[in-house]
Image (cartoon, rainbow, N blue to C red):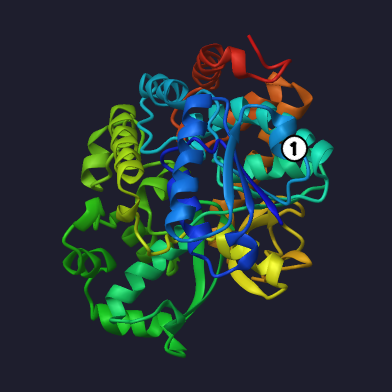
Amino acid sequence: MIKIVLVGGGSVHWSPRLINDLLLTPSLSLQSAEYVIYDLNQEAGLKMADFGNKLARHRGLSCSFHATVEASEALTDAHYVLITISTGDLDAMEYDLLIPDDYRIYQTVGDTVGPGGWARSLRNIPVFVELARSIERYSKNAVVLNYTNPMATLTKTFYQVSNLRTVGLCHGLFEVYAVLMRIFGLESENEIKVRFGGTNHFFWMLDMQIRGEDGYALLKERLNGRSFAEVVKELYDDEAGYNPDKLVSNELFQTYGYLPYVGDTHTSEFLPYYLTQDPSRLANYKLKRKTIEGRRMQRQKYTQRLDVYLSDIETVTTERSRESAADIIAAFESKQDFIDVMNLPNKGQIANLPKDSIVETLGVVNSLGFTPLTVGNLPEPLLNLVLPHVRNQDLIVEAALEGDRDKALYALYSDPLCSHLSYPEVKEMGEKLLKAHNRFMPEGIRL
């Protein structure tokens, strides 16, 4: 029997869908596993374990769920560890957004790059160091699946301080697939073939085929002189809160000839213009900020949904989500290949990005572990956009592990969202963020 641990498993956002996926996957190993909900919030953990047990019984499965707040109990002899934590939670994220606002940086998400992503990395890295060492101490052969942002810096941390097989997971590529399926009227993602690469939340479609034909040639034909944004807009009716306005993606496609990740709220944070100096720029590109108030309301809805599930387990969907943790574990257990989006150290899959930096490409998972698929070189114009972020991500991890505040600030100075500020202004903003998160900061970086 295998043991699967959900770290931060009390999360009402992540855990219900991950648990449901795991129990819907036709794998005897998954359906008879021991599941551990490891969360420092005991009440949340117990509630999620109750959900898992009720769902398992409802589906006639033999697996079991229990909750704990103890690392040793959770991690001893674990086979797979899924991470969905956020150090400081929403209260900390509020500082990530509010403090940069005073410096005319209006982040739309604030969880990957920019001042918010910088601060989020620094306060999460010490926790990830401790977690990596605990997993290695109690279950040195465990496979680690990380969902926590910033994806690159936190996945890199595991590789720097442990020998654990670790992958960072994100579903951004499937958002691109969804748009392409609408544009071309496709019935299945299998009709799309892509070669893509970059860093998490900032990747580019370097080549694509639609039903075996040149995808970019077909896209040009389908647009027929209209803009990408115009065509996408008319295909969506904003159902389920989906934002059909792709004005940033449209501008980047027109400028560089390659489609970026079409999640504009993420993509815009990697670039110097869209979110700085004048808030009207966001309105011009129809960029909507994810506010902390909105996140709290969303969490309340997720909590209410979990309560509904617990009172009537039959209301849980029998459709899988787009998260791939269950497929990855099933591939390990069945010794079959599974191809997915993976954030892994660069071993040459993107030839002109630094070795061992975390990059996002397709990869193969099987019983041997994670093997990235080769992309080749990023075109020079795209390299000029991606490379500074990759170097910054490495510098942030280095600074946190060494406890070097100056190095941490060097990374912030170089961030494109800070390009309109003087060095003293960036330092002042950075130090305000460090003070706001002081109790979470690495030793040597605290103020």
In the picture, residue 121 is in which quadrant?
top right
Per the image, the residue denoted by label 1 is 132
**One can see residue 271 in this view:** no
Closer to us: 254 or 172: 172
Query: Seen in the image, is 55 located left or right of residue 222?
Result: right
> 35 or 85, which is in the foreground?
35
Which residue occupies the extreme bottom position in the image?
212
SS at badge 1: helix
Residue located 32% across and 38% down the image? 307
Point 16% across, 61% down: residue: 237
Mark 1, other Cα within 10 Å: few <14 / some 14–19 / many ≥20: many
Which amino acid, mark 1? Ala
Q: Work out whether residue 412 can be spotted.
A: yes
The x, y position of residue 185, in whole percent, is: 28, 81
Figure quadrant of the C terminus = top right
Residue 271 placement (x, y as % from top left)? 45, 45
Q: Quadrant of residue 213?
A: bottom left
Task: Report how many numbered discs are placed on residues in the image.
Answer: 1
Indicate whether 382 appears above or below 231. above
Q: Is residue 233 above or below residue 211?
A: above
Residue placed furthest toward the top: 447
On screen, residue 208 above or below 94? below
Question: Is 325 placed left or right of 245 in the picture?
Answer: right
Q: x and y percent of residue 221 in the render?
A: 29, 85
Q: Position of residue 100 (x, y in %)?
A: 42, 24
In depth, the one of 280 and 398 nearer the eye is 398
* Left or right of 261, for residue 251: left
Residue located 40% across and 65% down the image: 176
Q: Quadrant of the N terminus?
A: bottom right
